[in-house]
Amino acid sequence: MFYDENENRKSISLVSIIVIILASLLVVGTILFDVQIRWVYVDKLAKSNQEVIVAQEENNKENNKENKKEEIKTQENKKEEKNENKSTQQTEKQEQQPTQKKEENDTKKQEQSTTQNQTQIPVVAPTQPATQPINPAPAEKNYGKIFLTFDDGPSNSTTGRLLDILKKYNVKATFFVTGNGSDELIKREYNEGHSIGLHTYSHSYKTVYASEEAFFNDLNKVDQRVYNAIGVHPKITRFPGGASNTVSKFNPGIMTRLAKQLKDKGYKYWDWNISSGDAGDTKDPDKIFENVTSQVSRDKRNIVLMHDIHEYTVNTIERIIIWAKENNYEFCRIEENMDPVHHRIAN
């Protein structure tokens, strides 16, 4: 009996221990199961967040791409607008340029037409002298051109034939006239487009250089002659012997004083930079031809001194003209708006 009770107690104790162990295992299993469930939930949550982040990044990338595309389009539109503006401005300029050129050409043609009408139409002596150009023409525009100038005429025996030659080749020249010849020759010179200048009436050194008063009395006399013939008071002159002459030294300083007084009275006196030599150096047409053609240059205005009162000079003119045209030189007349060529005054 005693044995059985002990055994029973042992059995009860054993069962209690087993129950306790099973309960403990159940509790531990429940805890582990709960932990596992929590880890799975956390893991899924983390993955879900990561997917959200990745989706947001991809969305941001797409948005950036779209923004860049918009910026590129905006820049291209701006470039196109600039190009269109440039094209419009260029078109406007191109449209304006022909108009401006046309206006300038029309103005030039009108001026040329006015000049030609003034020089070609025969003139009856008016009550008022013709107006003269004021602004000087730039000298460099006339570089390389030939200005034939003829002194001491007109001559009834030679000037008419000289005018025929000039007309044949459409060459314009300048005549510094005196009291010689007929008024009809001066009219013809003017009407055929040549320039008329004053060379004093008498061309006498002792007369014109005796005093300032004597010079202007003589100059006014030839001026009145020209005015009666063509109705114009020329303002271009040439001193007998040139401004550098020494034949006037019997009256010291007369050339210096006369040069200043001519300018004060509105005249322009012209000298020359090419001498044909026909004033006494030679009567040979070949030598005259050589003197002129050897000195002509494209680096200056070629102001040629000649005399239409000499037969040998007239006999040389056609050869000089042909030579100049073959070498592409242009002939011009002296005009009142040009700056003159001067010698150094020696008295």
Image (cartoon, grey):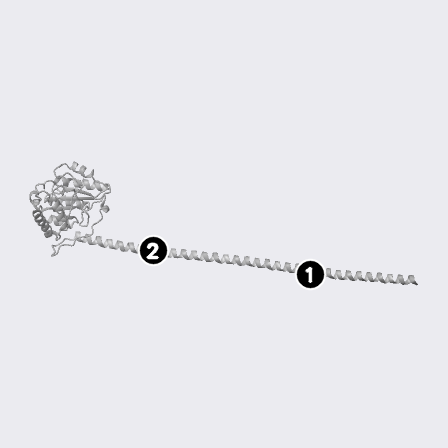
The residues tagged by marks 2 and 1 sit, at their Cα atoms, a distance apart of 82 Å
Q: Residues within 10 Å of mark 2 (few under 14, many from 20)?
A: few
Q: Which mark is residue 93?
A: 2
Q: Nearer the viewer, mark 2 or mark 1?
A: 1
Q: Position of residue 184 (x, y in %)?
A: 10, 49
| Residue 235 visible in image | no
Q: Which residue is labeled 1 in the image?
A: 38
- Picture residue at 91% right of the left edge, 62% below the top: 4
- Element type where label 2 sits in the image: helix
Q: Position of residue 190 (x, y in %)?
A: 15, 50
Count of picture labels: 2
- Picture residue at 73% right of the left edge, 61% below the top: 31
Left or right of 52 on screen, residue 320: left
- Element type where label 1 sits in the image: helix
Q: Residues within 10 Å of mark 1 (few under 14, many from 20)?
A: few
- Picture residue at 11% right of the left edge, 52% below the top: 227
* 35 lies above or below 216: below
Q: Position of residue 281 (x, y in %)?
A: 13, 36
In front of the other: 32 or 330: 32
Left or right of 162 on screen, residue 298: right
